[in-house]
Structure formats: structure tokens, C-alpha cells
Amino acid sequence: MTDDDESDPQEQSDQSDPPDSPAPPESSTTDPLEDILLSLDAHLDVLANERRRYLLEFLWDQPGRVGSFEAATKHTIAQLGRKYGSQPNHDDIQVDLQQHHLPKLADAGIIEYDVRSQTIRYRSNDRLEEIYERIAEFERDR
């Protein structure tokens, strides 16, 4: 038996794989239920914050589900004022929406935000809307 014959069988099989074959995705699962739960978790995470819910409510009420960032800010401020009895500072809310909530919604694929035109476009998501309705029903019943 030569030194070549004593090499690790795993190394030999690795060498036979084509060099440009794609690696399996790290996050893929074989359990469809796990994929559903991850998706549910992502939707719940998006809807967990009232400011994001107010942004979505605003967009759902707009023609074509597109609105300006300034109008969305004003809507959010009005909703917060109604809920808490006093209007929060416009600039504070604007910064919070722009730096935290719009990016979170965009990263989740829920909205597209055009910084140049200051336009927010909702990307239709039936499941998100269904979950939102359940949350809204829960809040109404409290």
C-alpha cells in the first residue's frame, strides 16, 4: 500500500466533486413546518412595533399603496397622539422611522423605500395582512 492509498476517503471524495459545484444553502431546512414557523416569526417581528403597524396602515389606505414619507410620518404622529394623548416630536419620529422602521420593513421585503423621491411602496403580502388583522382584533378587544 502506498502513501497515496492511505489517504482519507473523505479527501478522495472531496477531490472528485467538480470545483464549481454550488454548496448547499446553509439556512435551508428539510422540514416545511420549520420554514412556515420562520416565516411566521419574521411576520410577527415586523408587526411587533406599533410604529411599523401605523406605517403599514397608512400605506394600505393609499391609492396604489404608495405614499410619501412625510405623509407617513404625519400619520404615525397622529396615531401616537391619539393613543397616548400628546403628539410626539415630529423630528424624533421622522428619524426613528427613517433609521429603524423603514429599513426593517424594507429588509423584510414588505416595502420599497426610494430615498431620493421620499416614496414608500407597499409590496403586497396577504399573510402579513391576515396576521395584522388578528393583532388589530386583539387590540380592539382589550
Image (cartoon, rainbow, N blue to C red):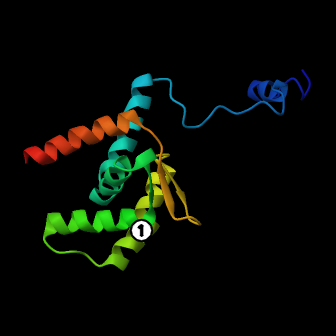
Q: Residue 132: x and y, percent? A: 28, 42
87, above or below 31, in the image: below
Residue matched to label 1: 70
Image height of 72 relative to 137, above or below? below
Front in this rendered view, residue 22 or 130: 130
Q: Who is closer to the viewer here, 134 or 56?
A: 56
Place residue 101 in its image quadrant.
Answer: bottom left
**Local SS, label 1:** helix
Residue 37 drawn above or below residue 123:
above
**Residue at 32% across / 49% down in the picture?**
47
Residue at 35% in and 51% down: 56
User: Label 1: few (<14), some or many (≥20) within 10 Å?
Assistant: some
Q: Please name the residue shown 16% across and 41% down the image.
A: 137
Query: How many marks can you see?
Result: 1
Q: Amino acid at mark 1?
A: Glu
| The furthest residue to the left | 142
- Residue at the location (34% across, 72% down)? 93
Q: Foreground residue, 141 or 31?
A: 141
Q: Position of residue 53 (x, y in %)?
A: 31, 53
> Within the image, what quadrant is residue 40 found in?
top left
What is the x, y in percent for residue 54?
30, 56
Q: Quadrant for the N terminus, please.
A: top right
Where residue 127 appears, as percent x and y from the top left, is 37, 34
Extreme residue toward the top, this view: 1
When asked about the image quadrant of residue 51, the answer is bottom left
Foreground of the two, 134 or 73 = 73
Q: Is residue 53 left or right of residue 102?
A: left
